[in-house]
Image (cartoon, rainbow, N blue to C red):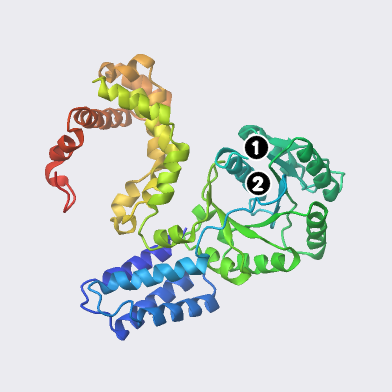
Amino acid sequence: MFSNLTERLTSVVKDLRGRARLSEEHIDSALRDVRMAMLEGDVALPIVKDFIEQVRVRALGEEVIGTLTPGQALIRVVRDELTHLMGDSNASLNFAAEPPVVILMAGLQGAGKTTTTAKLARHLAEVQKKKVAVVSCDVYRPAAIEQLAVLAAEIGVECYPSEVDAKPEAIATAALQQARKAFADVLIIDTAGRLAIDDEMMREIADLHAAVQAHETLFVVDAMMGQDAVNTAKAFDQTLPLTGIVLTKADGDARGGAALSVRQITGKPIKFVGVGEKIDALEPFHPDRMASRILGMGDVLSLIEEVEQKVDKDQAEKVARKLKKGKGFDLQDFRDQLVQMQNMGGLSSMINKLPGTSELPDHVKENVNDKELQKLGSIIDSMTLQERQYPAIVKSSRKKRIAAGSGTQVQDVNRLLKQFNQMQKMMKKMSKKGGMKNLMRGMGGRMPPGMTF
């Protein structure tokens, strides 16, 4: 999401480098590029006009005058205004009510409500340690009822039964009674969607909301809808007392203008954003972090939080102890690291959160391929335990068998073994006293400018 906008804004920063001061002419030229980038990114025109004017007023003020790095000063202003546009700070769910807190999921069919219901249930159960229950009121789509039951079982939360011949209000009311008896902290209700907004749909969801007195009403919207997302959000906001927005499929949209427009037009905060198909691919929406990401500054805080939540600390400590004792780093350890990386959304997801990624050459970005990591995992999975522990025994006949078992070529196996040998040497250097310094010295001239040991 926002990759097009990031690319354009990064070029604006480059153009301003080396300027002794930031003149009005420079600002106007830069803001023309920002304006075009936002319009191409599918941001609504009225919002773009207001945004550009706010940035221009601030950029011409005292904040920029006299600075030694005018490009950075302008980008700071743009970042602050982007953050303000998206809501200033993270808007969390309101749990200040007698449990169970009822969360109603609303939106059009195909926006990803059912999957998002399960993702939110997992997030609340695993990250916020809530006792969560879910129920489907989508009586028009039996597959949705079954899908939610399957996903609930997968993440280990209670899913209350639904019947297609029952009224949605009756299903929701019965589920709420069961949640109270079970002392659940949260009840999430998945509702029916339509291919388009209609009066019947709006009446039904309004009645459902009134029946359960929902504490949170989240509008689930597909980020790839562009400006249609904004129009749909307005229609729902007029019918329901929306408390927040969940953007889905944000990983599949290079523009991202819906995120900037929906918040501003509805006045409702974006509370979560879906960043992939996996059940754990739902993140709380932090406007300040997203603004930094848009401007190519990375999002290290989110990366740290992901490491805290998703990395198996016992496994990491096991490898660390192994290295400390001088025992070799084997292919099974390497396979475990690949799994940890995949749990965090893959290498591309991690790299996108690092500062400066937008300035990497295209050929470097193209080489960041999570499918290659999956291929490496398949090759290791096709090895015996002995081969994983002692890769040196993997010779010609074994390579052919491993390649056939993993659906790859012998050269792929050779490439893995070569990469692993290099990693083993690095791990060996790190395990010695002054390991990191030894490793960096070994890299010699390949060190980034300004980094010496």
Q: Residue at x 57, y 66 (%)?
A: 263
| Amino acid type of the residue tagged 2 in the rendering | Thr
Of callouts 2 and 1, which one flags the residue occurring earlier in the amino acid sequence?
A: 2
Q: Position of residue 310 (x, y in %)?
A: 46, 37
Name the residue: 47% across, 76% down: 51
Q: Is label 2 in contact with label 1 (beta carbons under 8 Å)?
A: yes
Q: Which one is nearer the viewer's eye here, 181 or 297?
A: 181
Q: Is residue 263 left or right of residue 352?
A: right
- Side of 134 where 248 appears, left or right: left
How far apart marks 2 and 1 lie (CA) works out to 9 Å
Residue holding disc 1: 151
**Camera-side residue: 339 or 104?**
104
Could you classify mark 1 by the number of other residues whose Cα lies within 10 Å: few (under 14), some (14-19), or many (20 or more)?
A: many
Q: What residue is rendered at 40% in x and 53% in y?
A: 299
Task: Estimate the x, y position of residue 279 in percent, counting from the top left.
Answer: 57, 41
Q: Secondary structure at mark 1?
A: helix
Q: Circle 2 is placed at which residue position?
A: 117
* The image quarter in which residue 78 lies: bottom left
Residue 198, percent across and down?
Answer: 78, 64
Name the residue type under label 1: Leu
Seen in the picture, residue 25 relative to 327 is either above or below; the reply is below
- Above or below, 116 relative to 385: below
Rendered residue at 44%/58% (across/down): 289
On-image quarter of the C terminus: top left
